[in-house]
Image: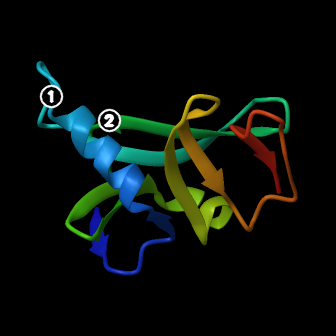
């Protein structure tokens, strides 16, 4: 497990505010760190992972703007340069992803192909 300063993923101020809000919820497990990743599946081939998890042996720990997150080392090739945002509008509520590595995305924006 290592810590690097150049994160492959960036987060908007809205995304960081929402993640911090979730971490302040009653019953939050403070031993968990925010995880960003990918998994096979979804209508375009791969789906994004956002969750709170324990750091594992093959994880990289990143810190940006006083915000820490972990990512499995091998996932960075799929997520390099991605921006995570949070929308809290009437028509759209949730995290959104702008991923320059994605060759196509699904209509809901939660899965992609490379």
Label whose residue precedes the other's in the sequence (2 or 1): 1
Please state if 54 lies on the left or on the right of 74 as rendered.
left
Q: Where is residue 99, by image quadrant?
A: bottom right
Q: Is residue 94 visible?
A: yes
Marks 2 and 1, how far apart in space?
A: 9 Å
Q: Which residue is mark 2?
A: 52
Question: At which x and y percent is residue 108?
Answer: 75, 33
Q: Where is residue 58, by image quadrant?
A: bottom left
Question: At which x and y percent is residue 76?
Answer: 57, 64
Contact (CB < 8 A) between labels 2 and 1?
Answer: yes
Please state if 7 lies on the left or on the right of 85 as rendered.
left
Q: Within 10 Å of the Cα at label 2, are there few (<14), some (14-19), or many (20+) other Cα atoms?
A: many
Question: Which residue is at the far top?
Answer: 27
Front residue of this view, candidates 67 and 70? 67
Q: Residue at x 84, y 30 (%)?
A: 43
Quarter of the figure that contains the C terminus: bottom right
Q: Is residue 58 visible?
A: no
Helix, strand or loop status at disc 1: loop
Tally of numbered tags: 2
Q: Residue at x 60, y 46 (%)?
A: 96
Question: At which x and y percent is residue 68?
Answer: 26, 59
Q: Within 10 Å of the Cα at label 1, are there few (<14), some (14-19), or many (20+) other Cα atoms?
A: few
Q: Which residue is mark 1?
A: 29
Quarter of the figure that contains the N terminus: bottom left
Helix, strand or loop status at disc 2: strand
Please state if 20 lies on the left or on the right of 41 as rendered.
left
């Amino acid at each position: 497990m290592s810590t690097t300063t150049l994160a492959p993923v960036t987060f908007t101020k809205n995304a960081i505010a929402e993640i911090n809000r979730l971490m302040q919820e009653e019953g939050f497990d403070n031993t968990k760190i925010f995880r960003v990743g990918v998994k096979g599946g979804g209508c375009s081939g791969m789906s994004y992972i956002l969750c709170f998890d324990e750091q594992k042996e093959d994880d990289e720990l990143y810190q940006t703007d006083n915000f820490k997150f972990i990512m499995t080392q091998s996932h960075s090739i799929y997520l390099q340069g991605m921006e995570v945002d949070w929308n809290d509008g009437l028509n759209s509520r949730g995290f959104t992803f702008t991923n320059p590595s994605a060759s196509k995305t699904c209509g809901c924006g939660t899965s992609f192909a490379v």
